[in-house]
Image: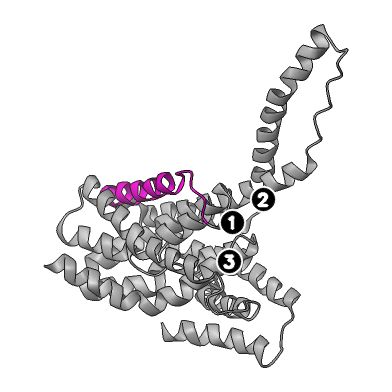
Amino acid sequence: MVPLYVTMILGYISVKWWKLFNAEQCSGINKLVANISIPLLSFRVISSNNLYKMSLKLIIADTLQKLLALFVLAIPIKVCSMGSLDWIITGFSVATLPNTLIMGIPLLNAMYGDEAAKMLSQIVALQSTIWYSLLLFLFEFRDAEAASATQRDETPVVEPEMQGEEQTQREEQPKTSTSLKVKLILLMVWRKLIKNPNTYATLAGLSWASISFRFGLKLPEVIDKSVSILADGGLGMAMFSLGLFMVSQPKIIACGIQLAVLSMGIRFLLGPSLMAASSYTAGLRARQLHAAIVQAALPQGIVPFVFAREYNLHPEILSTGVIFGMLVALPITLVYYVLLSL
């Protein structure tokens, strides 16, 4: 974890002290991470996972946890000034998308052995394949909905003398307008997603994984090493972008104490609780159940922060979750480990 913090601090001081980048350049660096580094990292994770040896129970448990989280977060409540969709996207990112790749696999390997490490690798693949794609869909849907609202024409006022068919047509206009609005939003989302490099990285990773593990093939060395070099830099670049973002905030706890506490509660209490219920329901027991719960108590992943900053949806909350989540993650996961061992 130390190299990740070194990278983040370098990003911070490169702007705070050295003045190397302006605001537009910082935004460009984050766009580079979101559209090049993260897709290559996703391709590497997905393509290296054996699709033919996935645990069905684990897939069910992971899916149940995400669906339960969406259900809980969709309960109509107001959190500070956030709208309902903003709250669902942010809460889903915090509650269910842990930093499994860097911290999780070595930690669970030390706690529960190779079986747990392999299980966590499958969770990483599911996260990259399904849940990051869902997250991108929600981000794009939110953007399209805002864009649609600004383009919407006002409904003409019905004059008192209008009667008969004209009056009926005007009354039916809101229903037709709503249907067209939904179709327009979905079309805008589809057009954005088919241009997003993450979509192609996911499809390419799945395709190559199905072929390579079926026929025992490997990527040509030059391609494999090219992807490896760029993918290894993905998390580092993401942490560097986090450091750049910190400079633009007036406080280290950018979202405020209230939201920071709420974020930590969602991350380390709600996430593991939902995973415990889902894993038990799916039939995971003993060490597999324990490993599933502990991985859910890992700190928040860096990728959702990159997406949140790219789409400008409360990146201050996710940045706080990443920074302080990694500081307290080790003692918290050890507490879960000890409690589950009793």
Q: Quadrant of residue 48?
A: bottom left
Distance from Cα at disc 1 to Cα at disc 2: 18 Å
Kind of residue at disc 3: Pro
The residue pinned by badge 1 equals 81
Q: Secondary structure at mark 3?
A: helix
Q: How many marks?
A: 3
Q: Quadrant of the N terminus?
A: bottom left
Q: Residue at x 43, y 57 (%)?
A: 127
Kind of residue at disc 2: Asp
Q: Secondary structure at mark 1?
A: loop
- Density class for disc 1 (Cα within 10 Å; few <14, some 14-19, many ≥20) is few
The mark that comes first in sequence, 1 or 2, is 1
* 168 inside magenta stretch: no
The residue pinned by badge 2 equals 143
Does the image show residue 49?
no
Q: Residue at x 86, y 13 (%)?
A: 162
The residue pinned by badge 3 equals 315
| Residue range (magenta) | 56-79
